[in-house]
Amino acid sequence: MVKLSRKSILYSALVLSLAGSVLFTSLPVYATSNSSSSSESTSSNEKSDEKTEEEKKAEEAKISAIQSSIANKEQQIKDAEDEKKKINSGLTDIKAIKAKLVAAKASLAQYVKELDENATAIQEKIDSLTEEIKVKEEEIVQAEEDLNEAIEMRDEQYDSMKKRLQVMYENGGDTYYINILTASSSFGDFLNKMDYINEISEYDNKMFEEFAENVEYVEVCKTSLETEKDLLDTTRTAAEEERKALEELISEKEAEIAAYEADIRNQQALIDEYEAYIAEQNSIIAELEKAVALEKENLQSARSYDGGKFCWPAPSYTRISDDYGWRLHPTLNVQKFHNGVDLAAPGGTNILAAYDGKVVGAAYSSTMGNYVMIDHGDGLYTVYMHASSLCVSAGQEVTKGQVIAKVGTTGRSTGNHLHFGVRLNGEYVSPWGYISAP
Ligand SMILES: [Zn+2]
């Protein structure tokens, strides 16, 4: 697990302060132009003639202190780069693990999808079987009714046959035929009547046989329907068992997917942590590189700050609208670092150089607007932002109290004011160590 050192936390604070409400990350590179450096070398030559042995020693000590500070920072940059490399290789490993987990999860999810499709198909089969069984049951009920009806018809036929035979028997064999004979107009008529009686009993027999056959037929139909229904029931039971097994398998696989997801989340959390640490290393490296560049610049500059008090940079100011330090952002509800002092003042009024120095920046940026940056020596700089116009240019020597710009509201600003910042050795510091309100 990544453990953040106290040092890196301190650097994060520095990074945060630089990324505060007024960004100062796009400072231009201060290249000394040939004309200004030649005029400067003349003046420094004059000065060096007056330098005492002690002053020379102090200057040498100062140079060697800056050089060792540069060497120290370069070592820190190397350490931070090494640290970043280590974290990067760890990050590569974690990303590979996560990729494997994601792939395993995807193939498992595909498998579950197929299982789901199977389960759906089986459910459809069960539904259609249930429908078929229902139809079959209705058919069986119908067959039962048909059977009862057929049995009834057969029995009725049997009863009427029985009745007719009984009548014939009760009327007594011979007497019955004699009666028919006497009632007949002729023998021919008698024979006709006898034929008729025979035909009736023959018809009765035929009808009875037909009805009995019908009963048998309906019984066979009903039995076959019941057999079909039994088969459907068996098929449905098997399908239901299959569906149950599938559902168990699906829930088992879903539990495995959930486990993969938890694993992936953990790996992602680790990746986030590593990436945050790498981003932090990058910020540290960037800040150290900036600080080294500034110190190298200081090495070249012969200027030194004598510790004198600054003058108030906006004489027409009405109030301090925002002080240096941490404050709650009014709309974002987060703590932001304000790296300077905001002096509300009417637009177009004077902005003064707080101290003697050399203008190293006089330009426009989208965040700072029209700004001036002055080098006072020994790594001490003042910054003036949001001006409506500039009165100096880069490379120019200025004296304490000289008008360098006019108050405005250019860049990221919500009204006329001077944002006054003080930088020491590459970091913003409280201006109140150098100025006091008039
Ligand atoms: Zn400000």
Image: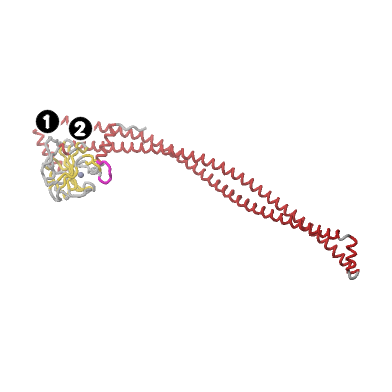
* Magenta span: 330-336
For the residue pair 396 and 119, the one nearer the viewer reads as: 119
Could you tell me residue 120's position as x and y percent?
55, 48
From the viewer's perspective, is residue 185 above or below residue 200? Answer: below
Numbered mark located on residue 66 in the image: 2
Q: Would you say residue 344 is visible in this rendering?
A: yes
The C terminus - image quarter: top left
Query: Which quarter shows the N terminus?
Result: top left
The answer to which of 286 and 36 lies nearer the viewer is: 286
- Tell me where residue 401 appears, x and y as whole percent: 10, 43
Q: Mark 2: few, some, or many residues within 10 Å (few <14, many ≥20)? A: some
What is the x, y in percent for residue 248?
A: 54, 40
Q: Report the residue marked by disc 1.
A: 55
Which of 216/186 is in front?
Answer: 186
| Principal secondary structure, stretch drawn in magenta | loop
Ligand 1 falls in quadrant: top left
Q: Work out whether 26 lies above or below 159.
A: above
Q: Residue at x 11, y 28 (%)?
A: 54
The amino acid on which the numbered mark 2 sits, given as a three-letter code, is Ile
Q: CA distance from mark 1 to mark 2?
A: 17 Å
